[in-house]
Image: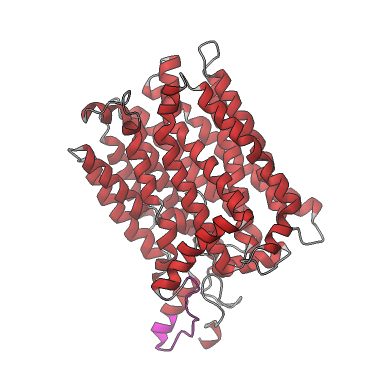
């Protein structure tokens, strides 16, 4: 028993390679089931965020909102849910260090479900908004923990592959929300956006009943308690006091975005990308209904293009990674910057799709043209995110990694909440959807160049960072990152 009690720094993979209790040594069926559970927990969080958009118009009517006078009120409950999720990357790592991942998945989702019930039965708009916020606050950890769960189970060489599935969970969850509710709300009411969400949450909870704990630190603690011996674990690397915890997930993240060019530039890029992709859940229904007289059912089906784009992005990312490893780096360690190839490729689709949709969402074009453009945007958007997040994951040693991923995740979710709030005002003030999307396209131009610049100058930027330990090659960086990684989301 003592041989399996590792004394290495806290967090991540501290269990001996031959330890039978290590998630790395689980049989494939157990790894697959646990990964699927984590996937579904993340899926239901983004599903809950966007399912609500299927009932936006009904909410406005029931609570006497005036979307033409105050456009933000019609979508504030989408944004406020995301503002609740905003806090999850800040507090989840500290909870996970102390109780493991499994209890947080279950308790967080159950509490979130209670507030979803509250939304469904709200009699005032204020109570609806408050309940949506707390539903996001308590549900958010599931999109944070998925990365840590995958890192517990799969070795570093599969990082890019499992990030593709992390992105797929978040993007397909968001896309299926309006697809499904587009058929239910017209027959029932907006309240069914919450009742269906509740059904999805409880289905996930039931499916997850048999999932084991994956966090090695918690596995070691439980094993030590059963044996009646000290666990000999080092103090939690995410902090042991309120001051040290705040330093890792609050103070250092702010320092990083202000002082570190690498983190600053990637955080801004990903924040903009995530914000733009969430504005589609407001812009697409508005454009399709006004321009093409689409019914709610047809509007919902239009989001299947996003599902297709997400699956294609996941497949493309994995193929790029495998081709790079097997063809170009067969006998040597690939540089960390090879992870940027997907972002370089995806950024071009991001840029092109914005101008594509801006100039084709008009009566003289078949509606399938702009709808396909939104799918292309999701394809490029997801490629960028599942490329740049693992790049930062491996660019810093453990403590710096957690701080960098925290600021990236929180800023990304914040932008996902802010941009949808103002998109209808953009449409109103700029007389349609063309110029708002054109402006987004012009902003995207310099951002598209960022992965190309990092491909050449990334090593120097990483070496100059005070959070970097000077790691040069990908494998060492991956090993270090996995020691600490506590599941900071990338898409939330």
Measuring from the top left, give residue 377's x and y in whole percent: 57, 33
| Left or right: residue 184 compared with residue 35 | left
Question: 431 above or below 157?
Answer: above
Residue visible at 49% across and 53% down in the picture: 409
Measuring from the top left, give residue 51's x and y in whole percent: 36, 37
Question: 22 above or below 44?
Answer: below
Question: 5 above or below 147?
Answer: below
Q: Report if residue 320 is visible in the image.
A: no
Count of numbered labels shown in the rendering? 0
* Main secondary structure of the magenta stretch: loop
Q: Report if residue 175 is visible in the image.
A: yes
- Closer to the camera, 330 or 349? 349
- Closer to the camera, 81 or 255? 255
Residue at the limit of the structure toward the left, as seen here? 123
Residue visible at 53% across and 23% down in the picture: 435
- Closer to the camera, 492 or 12? 492
- Closer to the camera, 18 or 96? 96
Residue visible at 22% across and 45% down in the picture: 118
Highlighted magenta segment, given as a residue range:
223-238
Measuring from the top left, give residue 228's x and y in whole percent: 39, 88
Question: 402 above or below 271?
Answer: below
| Left or right: residue 464 compared with residue 365 | right
Residue visible at 53% across and 61% down in the picture: 255
**How is the protein colored in the picture?**
secondary structure
Question: Does the magenta-highlighted stretch encompass residue 235?
Answer: yes
Question: Does the magenta-highlighted stretch encompass residue 468?
Answer: no
Measuring from the top left, give residue 397's x and y in whole percent: 61, 68
């Amino acid at each position: 028993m003592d041989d399996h009690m590792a004394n290495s720094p806290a967090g991540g993979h501290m269990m001996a390679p031959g330890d039978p209790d290590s998630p790395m040594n689980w049989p494939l069926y157990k790894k697959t089931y646990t990964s699927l559970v984590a996937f579904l927990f993340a899926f239901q969080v983004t599903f809950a965020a966007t399912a609500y958009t299927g009932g936006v118009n009904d909410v406005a009517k029931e609570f006497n909102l005036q979307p033409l006078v105050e456009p933000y009120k019609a979508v504030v409950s989408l944004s406020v849910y995301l503002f609740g999720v905003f806090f999850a990357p800040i507090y989840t790592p500290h909870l996970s260090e102390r109780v493991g991942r499994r209890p947080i998945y279950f308790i967080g989702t159950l509490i979130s479900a209670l507030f979803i019930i509250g939304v469904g039965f709200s009699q005032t708009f204020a109570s609806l908004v408050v309940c949506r916020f707390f539903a996001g606050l308590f549900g958010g950890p599931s999109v944070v923990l998925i990365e840590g769960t995958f890192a517990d189970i799969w070795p570093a060489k599969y990082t890019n592959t499992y990030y593709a599935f992390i992105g797929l969970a978040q993007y397909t969850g968001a896309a299926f929300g309006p697809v499904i509710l587009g058929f239910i709300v017209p027959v029932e009411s907006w309240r069914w956006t919450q009742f269906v969400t509740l059904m999805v949450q409880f289905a996930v909870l039931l499916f997850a009943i048999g999932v084991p704990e994956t966090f090695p630190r918690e596995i070691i603690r439980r094993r030590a308690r059963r044996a009646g011996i000290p666990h000999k674990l080092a103090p939690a690397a995410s902090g042991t006091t309120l001051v040290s915890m705040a330093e890792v997930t609050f103070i250092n993240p702010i320092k990083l975005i202000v002082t570190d060019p690498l983190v600053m530039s990637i955080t801004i890029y990903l924040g903009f990308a995530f914000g733009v992709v969430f504005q589609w859940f407001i812009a697409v229904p508005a454009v399709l209904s006004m321009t093409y007289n689409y019914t709610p059912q047809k509007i919902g089906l239009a989001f299947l293009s996003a599902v297709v784009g997400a699956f294609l992005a996941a497949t493309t990312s994995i193929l790029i990674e495998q081709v790079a490893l097997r063809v170009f780096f067969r006998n040597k360690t690939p540089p960390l910057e090879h992870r940027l190839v997907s972002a370089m490729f995806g950024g071009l689709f991001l840029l092109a799709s914005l101008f594509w949709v801006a100039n084709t969402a008009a009566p003289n074009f078949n509606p399938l043209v702009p709808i396909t453009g939104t799918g292309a945007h999701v394809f490029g958007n997801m490629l960028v995110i599942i490329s740049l997040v693992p790049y930062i994951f491996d660019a810093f040693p453990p403590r710096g990694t957690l701080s960098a991923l925290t600021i990236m995740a929180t800023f990304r979710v914040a932008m996902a909440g802010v941009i949808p709030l103002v998109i209808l005002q953009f449409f109103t003030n700029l007389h349609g959807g063309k110029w708002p999307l054109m402006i987004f396209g012009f902003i995207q131009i310099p951002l598209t160049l960022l992965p190309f610049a990092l491909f050449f100058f990334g090593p120097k930027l990483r070496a100059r960072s005070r959070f970097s330990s000077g790691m040069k090659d990908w494998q060492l960086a991956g090993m270090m990152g996995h020691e600490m990684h506590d599941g900071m989301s990338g898409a939330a």
